[in-house]
Image (tube, helix red, strand yellow):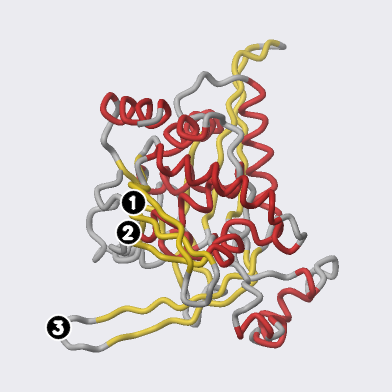
Amino acid sequence: MSTARQRVIALTEAGRKGKFRKSGHLVDEQLKYNYPKDENSQLTLWGQLLPETVKSIELYPEVEAENIVEGIRLTPAEDRVVDCLCKLLDKKSQNIDPKKKDTYFTGNSETRIVNNYGPDPTLAPGLAFTLYELTKEYKGGEVIGGKDTTNVMSILTTLDTRKYLIRHTEKRFNKATGDWKKREIEGFQKLIDILKVTATTGQGDREDSKETDFLILLNPIFRGQIDTKFILYPEDIHKRTMIAYGSWNLSDIALRLRDYLVREISSKRYKHTIYLDRLYYIVAEKWMKESRKGKVKEYLQKAIDTCEALGIIESYETKTGATGEPLIVFHLNKDWA
């Protein structure tokens, strides 16, 4: 057993056993990729979009059609902040009774009905928190300094300016009747809308304290079908991952492999077989398109080692598939987290 794995186990046993929910649709959007050998990858994405989606993109002339990609592509730092927002949404919401739709996973601030998420009006959750509170989550319990809060504020501000092409289907089944209903979701949307409020107290010319409060409106995807389609993460997932990786400077490849395999576990698929070439595109599409396959292999091995240290992977093996190409078989820990 590796030293990193021993440290993760020690942290798990010593810490809280709490978990938080993250929307399965949000994870799916973050893990989207384009694989050249797939038939649909040859279709022009622009030609597949609804007219209203095209119009919403055209409102931003600086966005070129050929640069539009489907899914929510985040940097490792942005990924961490989004996970923190998911955790705060879970902690600050009524998360017990999904039948109370007006309060279930709606946060602790003013909500809003939006009309650009799917075919009918949808509730967008609202979150209120301090910058210190979010930074504390982001740092995973580490000591917080001024640079940390400045960094988190910068990440939030960047997320507030970005839009993503979100496309998926939400489907619900009625087990009693066998009926089903689906909602087609498509839009060029922001993940968060920020209203920043800074409260400063003092006396005369003296400033005593300054604390930045945030009111954030979250995209409805943060709560979309979260009663039935969700992934559970340990509350200390960031710290565990840092220990397993050996640094806070996590690679995007390590985070994508972690989330990809955790999604497999959530779907009760504990033996996962995949051709290595496809896996390379899942975890590092940009690098593969830049012909940096050697780097992808190097970073993927580090990501696999990280997932082993986290306890997600119990074992793995590489084989030659039916096509003659190499594949990898992951044996996953069904009791992870």
Few, some or many C-alpha atoms within 10 Å of disc 3 (few <14, some 14-19, many ≥20)? few
Rendered position, 148 above or below 272: above
Q: Nearer the viewer, mark 2 or mark 1?
A: 2
Up-down relation of residue 217 to residue 164 (above or below): above
> Which residue is drawn at the image coordinates 57% and 31% (left, top)?
248
Label 3 SS: loop
The N terminus: image quadrant: top left
State yes or no: discs 2 and 3 in contact (Cβ < 8 Å).
Answer: no
The CA distance from mark 2 to mark 1 is: 8 Å
- Numbered disc in front, either 2 or 3: 2
- Residue 232 marker: 1
Residue 201 point in image, percent of width and height: 59, 20
Rendered image: mark on residue 202: none
Three-letter amino acid code at the position of disc 3: Ala
Q: Amino acid at mark 2?
A: Ser
* Mark 1 Cα shell of 10 Å, populated few (<14), some (14-19), many (≥20): some
Per the image, the residue denoted by label 3 is 176
At mark 2, the secondary structure is helix
Give left or right: position of 173 versus 249. Answer: left
CB contact under 8 Å: marks 2 and 1: yes
Residue on which the image places disc 2: 266
* Residue 30, image x, y percentages: 54, 60
**Residue visible at 28% across and 24% down in the picture:** 14
